[in-house]
Image: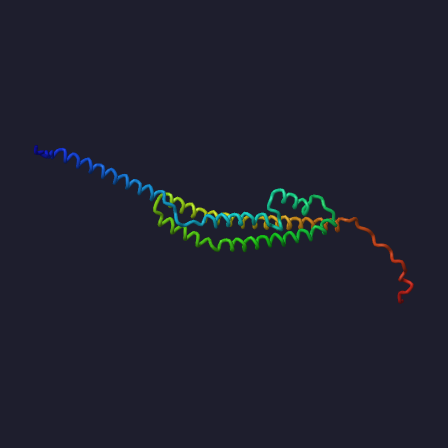
């Protein structure tokens, strides 16, 4: 028996519409995955290792001072030794050498700190430019956040350097102020002891010059 093929236009249209909807859904999912991939894309540039090393070296500068101490316990002990409350005249003279040596070492600490901070800052401009370029070319949210974090790390280096240098200068100013006050006090004490002694009548000469005087 001959077979007759029956064509249903409505069924064909419905099938075509379902296929189109499926294709559109797949396209939307593909776009969504692509957007998520761009959002999660990481920044190709990173200097966090260098910044971390620089911050560690800046922190070590405070532990290598040779003049005025950088810790509370050290400052209290040092000032108790160099600037005690009750002093004799011999103590005032003996402590002068120790105070001068401490002042010289404290000044050296400031100069050495400034030179070391300058050395550590040499690569900072390059790191800042790299982070800025990475931020401008960031392809997604994650990359932008990473680039911003790297720019903040450069700022942290600057702030740590400024703080370290200010602390070194503060130690120098504190030492100079204490030494100046101690020297003034020692001078007043020495003059007071010299001029505060009881006046005495000079002793008579052991010989009489009158018999040998010319007439």
Percent x, y of residue 206: 89, 58
Percent x, y of residue 140: 35, 44
Q: How is the image coloured?
A: rainbow
Image height of 40 relative to 187, above or below: above
Farthest-out residue, front: 1
Judging depth in this view, the residue of 41 and 60 nearest the camera is 41
Query: In the rendered view, does 153 fall on the left or right side of 8?
Result: right
Farthest-out residue, right: 211
Count of numbered circles on the image: 0
- Looking at the rendered image, the quarter that the N terminus falls into is top left
Query: In the rendered view, does 177 fall on the left or right side of 139?
Result: right
Farthest-out residue, left: 2
- Looking at the rendered image, the quarter that the C terminus falls into is bottom right
Percent x, y of residue 57: 53, 50
Judging depth in this view, the residue of 152 and 130 nearest the camera is 130
Residue shown at 83%/52% (left/top)? Answer: 201
Residue shown at 42%/45% (left/top)? Answer: 149
Judging depth in this view, the residue of 58 and 212 nearest the camera is 58
Image height of 125 relative to 30, above or below: below
Residue shown at 47%/54% (left/top)? Answer: 123
Task: Tell me which corner region of the image, top left, top right, bottom left or bottom right, holds residue 75.
Answer: top right
Percent x, y of residue 71: 60, 44
């Amino acid at each position: 028996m001959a077979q007759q093929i029956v064509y249903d236009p409505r069924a064909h249209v419905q099938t075509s519409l379902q296929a189109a909807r499926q294709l559109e859904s797949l396209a939307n999912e593909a776009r969504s995955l692509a957007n998520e991939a761009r959002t999660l894309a990481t920044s190709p540039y990173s200097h966090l290792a260098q910044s971390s090393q620089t911050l560690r070296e800046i922190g070590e500068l405070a532990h290598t001072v040779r003049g005025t101490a950088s810790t509370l316990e050290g400052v209290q002990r040092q000032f108790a030794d160099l600037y005690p409350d009750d002093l004799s005249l011999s103590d005032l003279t003996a402590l002068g050498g120790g105070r001068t040596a401490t002042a010289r070492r404290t000044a050296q600490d400031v100069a050495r700190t400034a030179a070391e901070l300058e050395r550590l800052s040499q690569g900072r401009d390059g790191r800042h430019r790299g982070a800025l370029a990475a931020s401008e070319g960031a392809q997604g949210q994650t990359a932008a956040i990473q680039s911003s974090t790297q720019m903040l790390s450069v700022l942290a280096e600057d702030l740590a350097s400024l703080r370290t240098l200010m602390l070194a200068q503060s130690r120098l100013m504190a030492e100079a102020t204490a030494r100046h006050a101690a020297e003034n006090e020692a001078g007043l004490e020495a003059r007071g002891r010299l001029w505060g002694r009881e006046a005495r009548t000079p002793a008579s000469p052991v010989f009489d010059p009158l018999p040998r005087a010319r007439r």
